[in-house]
RNA sequence: GGCGCAUUAGUCUAGUUGGCCUAGGACGCCGCCCUCUCAAGGCGGAGAUCGCGGGUUCAAAUCCCGCAUGCGCUACCA
């Protein structure tokens, strides 16, 4: 049984890079009928908050990445919040301490920092120097008497650490480059490296899929699994998400949170589609894929190991494709919150349909909806269409046509426009010469949705009114 | 400094066992078509001496060695 996990820290909004990790885990669980565990890594009490946890869960759900076990729904291996697993960590730490695989360290932060700087200055590796490694019981008591509270360090055994990475192959690290790392802080709480291993072990995680920034940490983790007597899971370290400058994507690259894209009107399916396309390419070459299609053809072993640069323009293209692939009524539903002033309009669905090919994100909706509001005062480019004999005749004719028929739906409007065009075309006029004056007279702009949409949404009466006004302005 | 990972066009990638690669696809860019406009869509084009230097081989993007560059880790952050 494949068990994967996504383990975010609730210290900020869900990051795009984390979302990609969550996606890969989800895809593996989905594709192999495995289970996905959501674990909240909130051991850093100062930086973690329940609000952030909520927002991360919400964004994950929005993306469509559901989990089978987690802090909100529980599960066989609960609790799923590290802050609630203190007893489990203490028990495991106690075991290592008893077996001599860990030892108390009384060094203060300042002492540690000082010796680290010294090591650096002397060209030595800035790893823990083993100061408290061989303290006698007597020495320990002395330090306790000074009021020092010990942290716990793992006694790193000599030799090489080997493990298999599903993407990078065989990995080997010499333990000499790893200092005795901390497993428990001096306040008794578990450190990252320790809590991760204890959780992955006790939650029976089979595949650890995470970012490459953890690759060197994994050596520590393997050591811990072995010391604790647990089977080592399979690992896959995916490449990092980069900003356009090639550095790991971070705040200074602008919008990096899933939330930013959600609020800008990107579709969750487009975002997951794009994230999957970074470091993976579909076998059939079809790139526009929904989440379920992704799950079907995705193969974690085909991931690319090189870092991927986030490209907003391709995301935009995909978002447009997803918008246009979506059934209109679904799109209308999703669009409503982005165009609050318009969504109540009885012809709102028609309005959406009319700008379907223009919008890249739902957030652009208000901008494109403007044509349906008050007519603009024709600008420099638009105004000339309202001058001259041709325009006068076209608009006059359009007004007459309009008053003689009732515009009830898009079809009526199409016929109206078609016959108007037909009539003047026969007199040797160019299509734009006949329709641009109408467009400008109705909206004041030279750009916008196809004329029949404008006529339908505005309605016959309003159109007549606007044509009259334009005509009046020409005399 | 040490250790690790990566390296195909501006970007994402295909290329798994060396010859079907005169390096394929996608975004972006340019052009044409369609079209009342903007788009969308269709068609076409430019863009990569496969990071560099050696080797192995009849033959290398693909194998070997070295170098360079980028990124990551080296916290009582995760």
Image: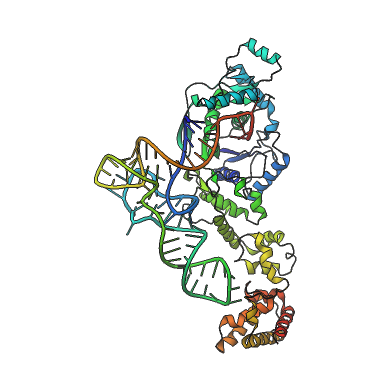
Q: Is residue A348 above or below residue B77?
A: below
Who's the residue at 64% across and 37% down the image? A39
Residue A407 position by quadrant: bottom right
Q: Is residue A170 left or right of residue A440?
A: left
Is residue A409 visible from the viewing direction of this image?
no
Q: Is residue B55 left or right of residue A475?
A: left
Residue A395 position by quadrant: bottom right
Who's the residue at 51% across and 38% down the image? A236
- The image shows residue B19 at horizontal and vertical percentages of 31, 50
Comparing A102 with B54, the one in front is: B54
Residue pushed farthest front?
Answer: A121
Q: Is residue A84 above or below residue B51?
A: above
- The image shows residue A409 at horizontal and vertical percentages of 68, 76
- The image shows residue A26 at horizontal and vertical percentages of 58, 44
Q: Is residue A268 above or below residue A413?
A: above
Is residue A337 visible from the viewing direction of this image?
yes
Residue pushed farthest top?
Answer: A138
- Quarter in which the C terminus of chain A is drawn: bottom right
Q: How many marks?
A: 0
Q: Is residue A183 left or right of residue A174?
A: right
Q: Is residue B51 above or below residue A428?
A: above
- Quarter in which the N terminus of chain A is drawn: top right
Who's the residue at 70% across and 15% down the image? A146
Q: How is the image coloured?
A: rainbow
- The image shows residue A345 at horizontal and vertical percentages of 74, 68
């Amino acid at each position: 049984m494949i068990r994967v996990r996504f383990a975010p820290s609730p210290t900020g909004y869900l990051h795009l890079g984390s979302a990609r990790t969550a996606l890969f885990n989800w895809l593996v669980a989905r594709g192999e009928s495995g289970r996905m565990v959501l674990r909240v890594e909130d051991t850093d009490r100062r930086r973690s908050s329940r609000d952030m946890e909520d927002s991360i869960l919400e964004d994950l759900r929005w993306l469509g990445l559901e989990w089978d076990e987690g802090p909100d729904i529980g599960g066989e291996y609960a609790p799923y919040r590290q802050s609630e697993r203190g007893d489990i960590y203490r028990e495991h730490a106690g075991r290592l301490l008893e077996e001599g695989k860990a030892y108390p360290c009384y060094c203060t932060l300042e002492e540690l920092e000082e010796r680290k700087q010294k090591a650096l200055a002397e060209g030595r590796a800035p790893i823990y120097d083993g100061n408290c490694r061989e303290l006698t019981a007597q020495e320990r008591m002395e330090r306790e008497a000074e009021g020092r509270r010990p942290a716990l360090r793992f006694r790193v055994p000599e030799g090489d650490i080997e493990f298999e990475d599903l993407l990078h192959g065989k990995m080997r690290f010499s333990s000499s480059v790893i200092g005795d790392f901390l497993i428990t802080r001096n306040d008794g709480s578990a450190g990252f490296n320790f809590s991760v291993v204890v959780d992955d072990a006790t939650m029976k995680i089979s595949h650890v899929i995470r970012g490459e920034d953890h690759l060197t940490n994994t050596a520590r983790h393997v050591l811990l699994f072995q010391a604790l007597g647990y089977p080592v899971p399979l690992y896959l370290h995916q490449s990092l998400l980069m900003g356009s400058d090639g550095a790991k994507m971070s705040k200074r690259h602008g919008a990096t949170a899933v939330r930013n894209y959600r609020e800008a009107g990107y579709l969750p399916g487009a975002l997951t589609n794009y994230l999957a396309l970074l470091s993976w390419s579909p076998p059939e070459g079809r790139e526009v894929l929904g989440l379920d299609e992704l799950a079907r053809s995705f193969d974690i072993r085909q991931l690319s190991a090189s870092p991927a640069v986030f490209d907003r323009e391709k995301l935009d293209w995909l978002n447009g494709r997803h918008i246009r692939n979506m059934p209109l009524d679904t799109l209308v539903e999703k669009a409503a919150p982005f165009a609050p002033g318009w969504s109540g309009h009885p012809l709102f669905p028609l309005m959406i349909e009319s700008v379907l090919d223009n919008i890249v994100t739902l957030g652009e909706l208000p901008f494109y909806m403007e044509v349906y509001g008050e007519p603009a005062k024709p600008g420099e480019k638009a105004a000339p269409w309202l001058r001259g004999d041709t325009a006068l005749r076209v608009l006059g004719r359009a007004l007459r046509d309009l008053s003689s028929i009732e515009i009830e739906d898009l079809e009526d409007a199409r016929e109206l426009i078609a016959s108007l065009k037909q009539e003047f075309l026969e007199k040797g006029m160019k299509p734009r010469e006949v329709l641009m004056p109408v467009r400008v007279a109705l909206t004041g702009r030279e750009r916008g949705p196809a004329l029949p949409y404008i006529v339908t949404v505005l309605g016959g009466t309003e159109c007549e009114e606007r044509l009259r006004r334009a005509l009046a302005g020409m005399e």
